[in-house]
Amino acid sequence: MNDKRSMPRAALSSNTCKMAKHLKRAAQGPESASPELRETVAGIIEEVRQDGMSAVRKYSKRFDDWNPDSFRVDAQTIERAARETPEELRASIDFARGQVLGFANKQRETLRDLEVETLPGVILGHKLIPVNAVGCYVPGGRYPLIASAIMTITTAKAAGVKRVIACAPAAKGGAGIHPAQLYAMAAAGADEIYSIGGVQALSAMTCGVEEILPVDMVVGAGNAYVAEAKRQLFGQVGIDLLAGPTEALIIADDTADARLVAADLLGQAEHGPTSQVILVTDSDPFGQRVIQEVEEWLAGTWPTADVSKQAWHNRAEVIVCSDREEMLRVADEIASEHVEIQTSDNDYFFDRLTNYGSMFIGERSTVAYGDKAIGTNHVLPTDGAARYTGGLWVGKFLKTVTYQKVSASGTRLVAPHVAAICDAEMMAGHAITARMRLERE
């Protein structure tokens, strides 16, 4: 196809920036949902919509081998999870929650209601109203993702959402939600917690089944099935964003530590075999050193080499640019979810980059901090969506609604212009409503 947007984002950058060369290219492009996957998701959603809890039970049993008397997690189970979570880990979870809550509260403070007299007798304004009910999906699968509970539930609560429910799949072995994950969900402030996973969880929260009342918005990451479910449910409910496999791009020059850069690339690669990791540099020798360091890590002591090696082969790229201006153009066109800056002039890129989900500036900063505990949110745009949106934040849970108050003097100023425009548009009924008000003054 000739449509550039159908190409992998990294390949697109090399076409645009002719001087850039690849020391390593990705073996495959980004995944898209197959027709079979889309059909499977649509079938589950429709079955939950029609059959309610019986469909939820059917798919929970099929996919997670989990079919308890009640999917809602009770207070005793939450208390037991707290006891089973080591004290040091509870302290770390509480620390992370505190950082995310603190930053979300500071963000909320920057958002204000507005009321202003724009003309004599014309008062316009907006109010920021929290969404009434939000469903947070907390993925399990390969790892019990503790931080995901904190990022979604805590932020919704900071926005003032009245009812926040959370769903997570049962851990393997029929033991319910992983204790540390459950502790994090409860500590983050979820009003209701259900041990349901996958498409059936998103469907249950959207449609409402038995005791699970429907929500107005669903948020949270997940696998390809969860992402497709959010795409299909969008409109019936709001969503945060459509997130694909995770991405990290590192901008580094020859002043950076090649071994540290290699570790950061592999750290993000352990999310899964389709994780995209990219190095953009202006130094061919430095790029070669990073590749060598990665290979040494994978052949030696890297703890998740089985997964990271697949991602390194499938989706990793090392791009060498002619200068920092080209590095900037390549990074902005790729529009990665995470961007690390490790150069001799970090401010150059910080001041000029426009397309990224979250930025990590200097060698002391790392994606892992943002993913887990530093306070910024880790639900971020992927697949080039950073060109037009940011990630999850407190403002995502707030509706900006407008209003007007008009006096007699305001009517005399506004009504004639409204009527004239209505006449020109041949919307006579609209014109009548304006002129009636004018005639009454």
Image (cartoon, rainbow, N blue to C red):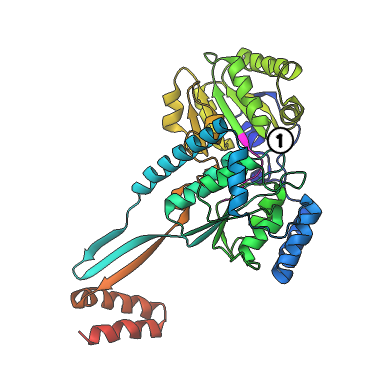
Circle 1 — which element?
loop
Q: Residue at x 65, y 13 (%)?
A: 289
Residue at position x 32%, y 53% in the image: 112
Q: What is the span of residues highlighted in magenta in the rendered image?
A: 241-247
| Residue 301 or residue 67, whichever sits in front | 67
Q: Please check the rendered image and state whether residue 389 is part of the magenta-colored stretch, yes or no.
A: no
Which residue is nearer to you in this view: 85 or 28? 85
Q: What secondary structure characterizes most of the magenta part?
A: loop
Residue 119 position in % (x across, y down):
21, 66
Residue at position x 59%, y 18% in the image:
260
Residue 262 can be seen in this image: yes
Residue 400's quadrant in the figure? Answer: bottom left
Q: Is residue 242 visible?
A: no
| Left/right of residue 197 with respect to residue 113 in the rendered view | right
* Front-lying residue, 259 or 322: 259
- Packing grade of label 1 (10 A; few <14, some 14-19, many >=20) is some
Q: Is residue 24 above or below residue 51?
A: above
Whether 243 is among the magenta residues is yes
Up/down of 359 relative to 318, above or below: below
Query: Quick check: 2 above or below 85?
Result: below
Q: Position of residue 85 (x, y in %)?
A: 60, 37
- Residue 150 is situated, as x and y percent measured from the top left of the image, at 53, 43
In the rendered image, which quarter is residue 419 located in? bottom left
Residue position for label 1: 272
Left/right placement of residue 425 relative to residue 85 reads left
Q: How many marks?
A: 1
Q: Residue at x 72, y 15 (%)?
A: 296
Q: Where in the figure is residue 188, as x and y percent of width and height?
A: 51, 46
**Front residue of 427 and 152:** 152
Instruction: Give the residue type at disc 1.
Output: Gly
The C terminus - image quarter: bottom left
Report which quarter residue 204 is drawn in: bottom right
